Image (cartoon, helix red, strand yellow):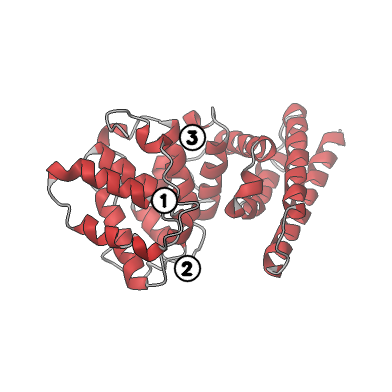
Amino acid sequence: MRLEQPDSVWSGRFSWEGDTRSFDHFSWLVDYLGCLCDPDDDEVVTHTLLVLSGMRQLGNSTEWQLAYVKRLFSYMGLGQPRHVRHAALRAAHDARSALASIDISGDEALPLINPLLPDEQESFDPKRDLCFLRLVFTLARNRDSGWRPHLVKNNYVKRCVDIIEPSLRWYLHPFYLLGFLLRIAPEEPQVTDEQWKKLIKEAWHAAAVTNVLLIDDDGVEALRPLVKCTTQHMIDGGASKDTLKRLDDHVASALKMLERRKQNLRDPSPETRACTLQNVIFEVEGLKDKVHEALISP
């Protein structure tokens, strides 16, 4: 991989699928990262972080998990070269589900970071910012893990608000951006009613035409607050008939995606997962009924 190519950090594939070696074979790289403090080693750090980005699971040691989080966040800190910060963001993104399960509520030593360089604050990069949005969306999943106050403290809400408009031109960005806001700042005053409506429309569009509901467990669960938000801003908010017609089509397609997911649920043993999926389907069906009623009303 050539680091001078801007997209190389985001486009490379570093998955360990098919690798027979265990997590323990690679965990030593986290200790190795702690020794790479010389600025001349930034290329080595970048490649090490990208190797670790293939590590989806983080073992069972709470101490080791927190050490890994601190390493990642320190390399996203101010003063680090661009590629180092971006590689750390990529590694955090790829392990986001495991990171979200870590309870950081009692750890005041967790670095306060912003994964974007100062000159990137006003810019928008679709690949980088999709990693950013999916990461913060997942980290905000558990209200008791300590991640939510950490994200607020680091101004992640402001960053998401700042990129609402450019995000609307893409499929998945509005889905994760809205999902994050609904988890952490559902009444964010900086977001206008018109922006809420735009995000809602594009989020349902993504649910209808992408595979997000087939591959992302968090994405399915995010439909519940999305249904509530849609009712508030689109149904009760008096959206136009044209808008409601498009919404009706997208919700219908999203329901088909959920039914496909239900049919593909090969392991029936986790009953809670199947029950959650069925409950989500019921709620989306209820929204579709409301949209239909709004469409036929005078």
Looking at the image, which is closer to me, 182 or 206?
206
Residue type (three-letter) at the residue carrying disc 1 = Gly
Res. 103 visible in picture: yes
Residue drawn 76% across and 59% down?
278
Residue type (three-letter) at the residue carrying disc 2 = Asp
Rendering quarter of residue 108: bottom left
Q: Earlier in the sequence, mark 3 or mark 1?
A: 1
Q: Earlier in the sequence, mark 2 or mark 3?
A: 2
Badge 2: how crowded within 10 Å, few (<14), some, or many (20+)? few
Quadrant, the N terminus: top left
Residue drawn 36% across and 37% down?
9
Coordinates of residue 243 in the picture (x, y in percent): 72, 30
Badge 3: how crowded within 10 Å, few (<14), some, or many (20+)? some
Left or right: 191 in relation to 288: left
Left or right: 172 in relation to 26: right
Residue type (three-letter) at the residue carrying disc 3 = Ile
Q: How far apart are the alpha carbons under marks 2 and 1?
A: 27 Å
Q: How far apart are the alpha carbons under marks 3 and 1?
A: 29 Å
Q: How far apart are the alpha carbons under marks 2 and 3?
A: 27 Å
Q: Are marks 3 and 1 in contact (CB under 8 Å)?
A: no
User: According to the image, label 3 marks what residue?
Assistant: 164
Q: Earlier in the sequence, mark 2 or mark 1?
A: 1
- Which mark is nearer the camera, 2 or 1? 1
User: According to the image, label 1 marks what residue?
Assistant: 54
- Which mark is nearer the camera, 3 or 1? 1
User: According to the image, label 2 marks what residue?
Assistant: 144
Quadrant, the C terminus: top right
Q: Is residue 46 above or below residue 166?
A: below
